[in-house]
C-alpha cells in the first residue's frame, strides 16, 4: 500500500512540474511575441534565443529569432535559425525568408533554390516574389523572370489547373434561342476571381433576370452551381464533366415548392452551347423536359 501511495504521489509531482514548465514556456513565448510585435528587435532576438535553448524543437521560436535578426540586418546570423525552423516544421514561409536572407547576402544560387522550395511547398501569396524589394539584388539575374512567372502562376491556381477550366466553353456573351429558333433571352457569362468563379448573368426575353455562380470543388472533384432568379427561385446543383458535357443534378427551391432537376451543358464548338434541363416533382419517379435552348455567341 505504501509503495502504491508513493508511486501515486510521484506521478502527481511530475505532472505538477510538467504543468509549471508548460506555463513558464507559454509565458516566455507571450513575452517574446509582445517584443516581436512591438518591433523591439534586439530584445526580441534575445528572448527567442533563450527560448530556442530551452525548447530546441520549437519551430516558431527559431523562425521569429531568424526574423528578428533579419530585421536587425544581421543576415548571416539569421540563416541558422531559419534553417532550424525549416528542419523542424517544413513551413514555406521560413523557406521564403531564408531565400530573402541569401539575396541580401548576395548568395544568388541559394536564394533561387529556396524560392523554388518555398513555391513547391505552397508559399502563400506567391505574387509577392515579383515585387519584393528584399529580392532586388536578384532582378538583373536572367533566372528572375522565370521564377517571378512561376510565382504568378502559382497564385493563379484556378487559371492554371485543368479541372477549373472544364466549363470555360460557357464563358462569353450569348444570344439564347429555343427549338423554334426564337430568341428567349441573353446571357453574359464571365470569369471572376482569377478564373475561380464562373458568373452567369441571365436576362429573359420577358424581362426576368437571374444570376448563378459556378465553381469547381477540388476536394469533391465536382462542379457546383447556385442560381437565384428575380422570382425568388434558387437552384442548387452539383455535377461533373462527362463526355464533353457539364452535367448537373440537384434541386430547385421555389416559394412553397421543391423539385429535383437535371441540367446539362453541351459544348457544340467555339460558338455554340446547348443547355437542356428536366425536372421531377415526385422524387425522381417521372421527369419532364422544361428547357432546351442553344446559346449562340455574339459576334
Image (cartoon, grey):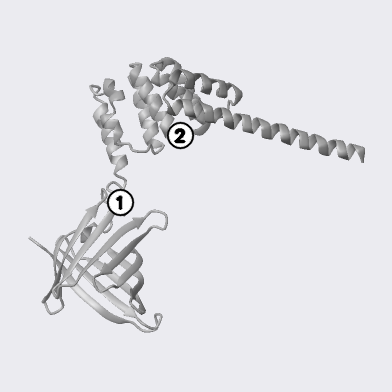
Q: CA distance from mark 1 to mark 2?
A: 27 Å
Residue 37 seen anywhere in this rendered image of the structure: yes
Q: Quadrant of residue 250?
A: bottom left
Q: Secondary structure at mark 2?
A: loop
Q: Is residue 148 above or below residue 253?
A: above
Q: Is residue 30 left or right of residue 69?
A: right
- Pick whichever, 267 or 221, lies toward us: 221
Packing grade of label 1 (10 A; few <14, some 14-19, many >=20) is few
- Pick whichever, 242 or 276, lies toward us: 276
Q: Quadrant of residue 156?
A: top left
**Which image quarter holds the N terminus?**
top right
Q: Position of residue 197 (x, y in %)?
A: 28, 55
Packing grade of label 2 (10 A; few <14, some 14-19, many >=20) is some
Q: Is residue 123 left or right of residue 54?
A: left
Q: Quadrant of residue 298?
A: bottom left
Q: Position of residue 71 (x, y in %)?
A: 39, 21
Q: Which residue bears the numbered disc 2?
A: 91
Residue 147 seen anywhere in this rendered image of the structure: no
Q: Residue furthest left?
A: 299
Give the residue drawn at x 21%, y 59%: 169
Q: Position of residue 46 (x, y in %)?
A: 51, 18
Q: Secondary structure at mark 1?
A: helix
Give the residue drawn at x 35%, y 67%: 237
Give the residue drawn at x 21%, y 76%: 292
Give the residue drawn at x 28%, y 40%: 153
Q: Is residue 77 left or right of residue 140?
A: right
Q: Is residue 179 above or below residue 27?
A: below
- Mark sitting on residue 228: none
Q: Which residue bears the numbered disc 1?
A: 162
Mark positioned earlier in the residue sequence (1 or 2): 2
Q: Position of residue 212 (x, y in %)?
A: 27, 63
**Which image quarter holds the C terminus?**
bottom left
Amino acid at each position: 500500500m505504501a509503495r502504491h501511495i508513493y508511486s501515486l504521489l510521484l506521478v502527481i509531482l511530475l505532472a505538477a512540474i510538467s504543468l509549471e514548465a508548460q506555463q513558464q514556456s507559454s509565458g516566455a513565448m507571450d513575452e517574446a511575441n509582445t517584443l516581436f510585435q512591438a518591433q523591439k528587435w534586439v530584445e526580441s532576438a534575445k528572448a527567442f534565443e533563450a527560448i530556442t535553448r530551452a525548447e530546441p524543437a520549437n519551430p516558431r521560436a527559431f523562425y521569429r529569432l531568424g526574423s528578428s535578426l533579419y530585421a536587425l540586418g544581421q543576415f548571416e546570423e539569421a540563416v541558422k535559425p531559419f534553417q532550424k525552423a525549416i528542419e523542424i516544421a517544413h513551413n514555406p514561409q521560413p523557406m521564403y525568408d531564408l531565400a530573402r536572407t541569401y539575396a541580401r547576402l548576395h548568395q544568388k544560387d541559394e536564394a533561387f533554390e529556396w524560392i523554388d522550395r518555398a513555391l513547391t511547398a505552397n508559399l502563400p501569396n506567391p505574387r509577392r516574389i515579383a515585387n519584393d524589394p528584399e529580392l532586388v539584388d536578384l532582378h538583373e539575374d536572367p533566372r528572375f523572370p522565370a521564377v517571378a512567372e512561376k510565382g504568378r502562376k502559382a497564385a493563379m491556381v484556378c487559371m492554371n489547373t485543368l479541372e477549373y477550366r472544364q466549363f470555360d466553353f460557357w464563358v462569353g456573351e450569348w444570344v439564347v434561342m429555343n427549338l423554334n429558333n426564337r430568341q428567349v433571352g441573353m446571357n453574359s457569362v464571365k470569369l471572376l476571381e482569377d478564373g475561380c468563379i464562373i458568373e452567369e448573368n441571365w436576362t429573359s426575353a420577358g424581362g426576368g433576370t437571374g444570376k448563378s455562380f459556378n465553381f469547381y470543388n477540388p476536394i469533391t472533384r465536382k462542379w457546383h452551381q447556385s442560381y437565384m432568379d428575380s422570382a425568388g427561385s434558387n437552384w442548387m446543383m452539383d455535377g461533373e464533366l462527362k463526355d464533353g458535357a457539364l452535367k448537373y443534378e440537384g434541386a430547385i427551391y421555389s416559394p412553397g415548392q421543391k423539385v429535383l432537376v437535371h441540367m446539362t451543358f453541351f459544348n457544340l464548338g467555339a460558338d455554340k452551347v446547348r443547355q437542356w434541363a428536366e425536372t421531377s416533382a415526385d422524387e425522381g419517379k417521372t421527369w419532364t423536359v422544361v428547357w432546351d435552348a442553344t446559346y449562340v455567341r455574339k459576334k
